[in-house]
Image: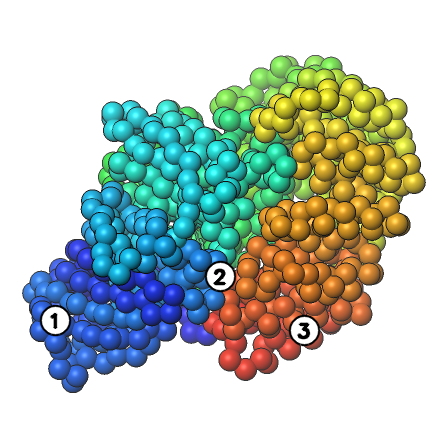
Amino acid sequence: PPLIHLAEYRPSDFLIDRVDLDVRLHPSRTRVTAMLALRPNPAGDPTAPLRLDGDELALVALALDGQPLPEDAYAVSPSGLVLSAPPRRPFTLAIVTELDPGANTKLMGLYRSGAVYCTQCEADGFRRITYFLDRPDVLSVYTTRIEADRDEAPVLLGNGNPVEAGALDGNRHYAVWHDPHPKPAYLFALVGGRLGHVATRFTTMEGRDVAVAVHVEPGKEARAAYALDAVVRSMRWDEEAFGRPYDLDVFNVVAVSDFNMGAMENKGLNIFNDKYVLASPETATDADYAAIEAIIAHEYFHNWSGNRVTCRDWFQLCLKEGLTVFRDQEFSSDMRSRAVHRIAEVRQLRARQFPEDAGPLRHPVRPTAYAEINNFYTATVYEKGAEIVRMLKTLLGPDAFRAGMDRYFAENDGRAATVEDFLDAFASVSGRDLAAFAQWYARPGTPRLAFRTAYDPAARTCDLTLSQSLDGGPPLVMPVALGLVGPGGALDADCPDLADGVYVLTDREATLRFRGVTERPVPSLLRGFSAPVRLDGALTEADHLVLLARDTDPFNRWQAGQSLALRLIRAGGPAEAFAEALGLLLDAEAPRDPAFAALMLSLPGEGEVANEIEAEVDPDAIHGARKALRAALGRALRDRLEDIEARLAEPVGTPYSPDAAAAGRRALRNAALDLLAAGDPQAGAARAAARLEAATNMTDRLAALGTLALIPGDAREAALAAFGARYADEPLVLDKWFALQATIPEPGTPERIEGLKRHPAYALTNPNRVRALVGSFAFGNPTQFTREDGTGFALVADTVAALDGANPQAAARLLTAFGSWRKLKKSRAVKAEEMLNRIKAIPGLSRDVADIVTRTLA
Ligand code: HT7
Ligand code: ZN
């Protein structure tokens, strides 16, 4: 597919100041009349034709300044409308298009999720509604009139504030919405349907009284209460942490069940995948509650970082996404335990972004070229983008960072900005030159940080040498939070190069001298994971044990445990010392911070282990080694784990609370169950079955089922069947059941999946179902996905092929599971390559899939 280049950015030749839309909803013949107020852009080419974007559109009528246009004045096709000699003054265009929302399976533009009409316009879906300058640097004020059958769509929602509503003949009705804030077309939205809601009010710091509502399928209102509360907490937090108030009289969230991603930040009308709204103790886990809180916050925070200040072009996607992920991470850290949350963020980064950065789909946080923008909503843009903002805060300190954010919002409000605009705001408030730091946006790949120490006991000095590398290129500006630790705890040594415990590495190599070092120190580096790099280890097992027991930085205590586990998984050897250290840590931490203790018990995932391996990856060997270590730990820690299990059992009748403390206790108790079962599967199966029976909430029920699912036998099959029957009418719970079975690391799993594809609840048209069943297999079952007989690859490739015609975005995302194929053992890699070539040869492939398959094979 042809590429679009950042270097070729040009301002639009025309601007659209106002958009008046009239949308008459109908299942197969929705009429859209768009009245556009256009004018030439002074920054554009004054001789250029007017080229409006379209995608699968059918034009019904066209008028310029109220006069129908003669046919030779324009050229129209489903993918565009061109006026060769447009007026060189302000003018209006009235465009009438007809859409078939019921047939829109791509879930972009106007479509139907069940019976609900909804829209998805980012990145380029508005052009599926009307012909438009569908680019983020064209900002317009929208007024939307929505008309529908009253029975089919009693609720009509749009962007901005409601201004009018009324009845019409023939059981029809209408509502008019006006959004005073100029916005790009990707933030347009409307919803029409039969929906229930929960509502509250929030008064902003400016005294604005806001009506807040969450709309869901009728009957599910009670499951929206947590999301509603999360909206209010997000509104309050953005005022307190960033001084950002809400700016409309209403804020609506709508949950729909057919949605390509997690959610969408449309102005005043956030549309959500129902997975990230609906929660009850019976249907949602603690992790679901945490995800709902985070995603509600994320979309709400976009109101400033994305909507009020938007992106000039899609190359600047990280400007809104990386920044907003950083903001939602900070919110969750304030709502929950900061240390525990940081560990979760880093695990996610390593599991998703590091492999992307190391594989054929690698790209800079700000890409310089793309064939299909929808393929760039990646872990690199989002997660690594957030890490860059975090580093900026570390470099500048909290006060200058906040001042820079204030400056950024003030100077760019109502504008479509760039990464340069963002960095300029921080440079001007701090007086710092951020040109070298900006390289983080441009350089793909994960930098390596290596170190060595030289301790002189006589002089009581320790020299710490840090060196960085990334593809042989120039050094990056890397904040390294660090300290020295001894067997007795943190060493109070003096180092003038540190400011607030952070050394900013700007050269390829630098040596820091610590004075007053009274015992042989162990360096604790990259505390809090202060930069998104790989730390090349020069620590011994004994050193890691010191950090595990004694570091003052909780992230690095956890990291020491991970490093010890990684060594044992990769090289084998006795696990006694590690088990003993974990035992002591459990004694201290389990009563104090159960969530942290639970994290200490979870070993690096198989994917993370694979990431660390330079040679060819053998997923079976990794799986076997990890399983063996888990078994050894389960046996060595048995008494303590049993004690935890008993002590953390909730008294009968304890009401469920999704708060971090209660969730932490459940996490530890369930981690104990899982490790005990790894050590003694026979006893573990019985224990898990009993826990399943006794469970009073979905967190405990799913955890017990997950433990049981790893132990082949009748008990497992009976439990799976009972769970499936119990939740037959709960699609979001069935997704957990699909995912759990898809990740069973056994040869029978592909066949099991084929059976589940015939389950009445499974549908290729619903992205959640496909992600749960096939996506979980592709991304979460490495031994079976990469099997030498090729059946795992074939299962996923067949799904990609079957899905591509209906929903290219979902198909392309699934295909990214092949991203690490070249690192696999040859016998497996050839099978992956064969499948990729088979996909590539399919005639009529979408641009989305063609782009991923081409880059994956390159
Ligand atoms: N800004 C949104 C990203 C998005 C999206 C959402 C739903 C369907 C298709 C989409 N394409 C891009 C979500 C976010 O990051 O906040
Ligand atoms: Zn976002």
Horizontal and vertical percent position of residue 708: 81, 43
SS type, badge 2: helix
SS type, badge 3: helix
Q: Which mark is residue 64?
A: 1
- Taking the spot 75% from the left edge, 43% from the top edge, the residue there is 706
Residue occupying the far bottom of the picture: 72
Looking at the rendered structure, the kind of residue marked 1 is Leu
Horizontal and vertical percent position of residue 37: 14, 60
- Taking the spot 12% from the left edge, 65% from the top edge, the residue there is 92
Check whether the beta carbons of the residues at disc 3 and disc 1 lie within 8 A of each other.
no
Q: Mark 2 points at which residue?
A: 375
Q: Does the numbered disc 1 mark a residue whose Cβ is under 8 Å from ligand 1?
A: no
Q: Does the numbered disc 3 mark a residue whose Cβ is under 8 Å from ligand 1?
A: no
Horizontal and vertical percent position of residue 335: 51, 26
Name the one closer to the observer, 10 or 434: 10
Earlier in the chain: of badge 2 and badge 3, it is 2
Position of the C terminus by quadrant: bottom right
Q: Does the numbered disc 2 mark a residue whose Cβ is under 8 Å from ligand 1?
A: no
Residue 325 appears in the rendering? no
- Taking the spot 66% from the left edge, 17% from the top edge, the residue there is 491
Earlier in the chain: of badge 1 and badge 2, it is 1
Q: Which mark is residue 835?
A: 3
- Taking the spot 25% from the left edge, 29% from the top edge, the residue there is 208
Of circles 1 and 2, the one toward us is 1
